[in-house]
Image (cartoon, grey):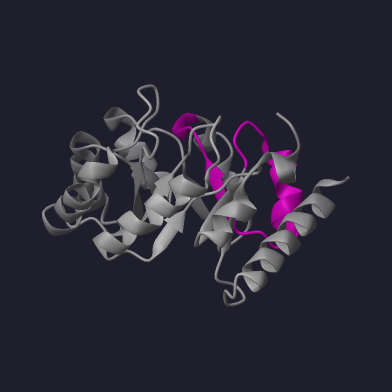
Amino acid sequence: MEIEARLEDVTQRIAGVAEKAGRETGSVNLVAVSKTFDADMIQPVIDCGQRIFGENRVQEAQGKWPALKEKTGGIELHLIGPLQSNKAADAVALFDVIETVDREKIARALADECSKQAKALRFYVQVNTGMEQQKAGIDPRETVAFVTMCRDVLKLNVEGLMCIPPADEYPGPHFALLAKLARGCGLEKLSMGMSGDFETAIEFGATSVRVGSAIFGTR
């Protein structure tokens, strides 16, 4: 299947599940995860009308997205991988949305850079719903307090929560937990669901899904 057909298939599946769940048309955004793929692979997806993309690494994104964004207006670029504070300046300069805020040090670095660069980014707090030691994300029990600090003290525009459930568990309870935490924070946006589980995520209220291999193929 060609990349354009795979994109159409994913788009139709998103719309179908959203409709079945009683969601409004267009209530779920597709973030096409283009990490590890070069500009030649990404351009056909842009040509099909896709405008929201996700990247894992700042340095990799710097190598391809400035030219792609210059070529096509309206691109919205999301950072969906872990961010080190020494890369905060570069991340703020390139990305529109950062989905992986998970500790005070990085939150403060991002707030400082947004102020310095006079940029108004949107942010998601990443929650480690499975409390996995090797995975990034804030402890679910600390989420409400952390979001409050980010918004009220640092003045970050936190618009939602993000999670990556444990690979070996059914994701439903993790998506349900993220939705519950978001309600407790007064947040409406939920970034959850990837190629293997985005339909389940939509059933649990995802407002954006991060899909890579189902569109671009295996890496």
Tell me residue 37's x, y (percent).
67, 34
Residue 121 visible in the current orientation: no
Q: In which quarter of the image is the C terminus?
A: top right
- The answer to whether 114 appears left or right of 18 in the picture is left
Q: Give the range drawn in magenta.
A: 34-59
- The answer to whether 117 appears left or right of 207 in the picture is left
17 vs 132: above or below: below
Which residue shows up at 11% across the image and 54% down it? 153
Say whether residue 204 is magenta: no
Q: Quadrant of residue 113?
A: top left
Front residue of 117/83: it is 83
Which residue shows up at 57% across the image and 59% down it? 202
Q: Quadrant of residue 18?
A: bottom right
Tell me residue 115's x, y (percent).
20, 52
Tell me residue 29's x, y (percent).
56, 62
Say whether residue 40 is magenta: yes
Front residue of 141/46: it is 141
- Tell which residue pokes out farthest to the right in this image: 1
- Tell which residue pokes out farthest to the left in this image: 153
74 vs 181: above or below: below
Tell me residue 53's x, y (percent).
57, 50
Q: How many marks?
A: 0
- The answer to whether 112 appears left or right of 153 in the picture is right
Front residue of 216/64: it is 216
Q: Quadrant of residue 119?
A: bottom left
Q: In which quarter of the image is the N terminus?
A: top right
- The answer to whether 161 appears left or right of 13 in the picture is left
Residue 60 visible in the current orientation: yes
215 vs 180: above or below: above
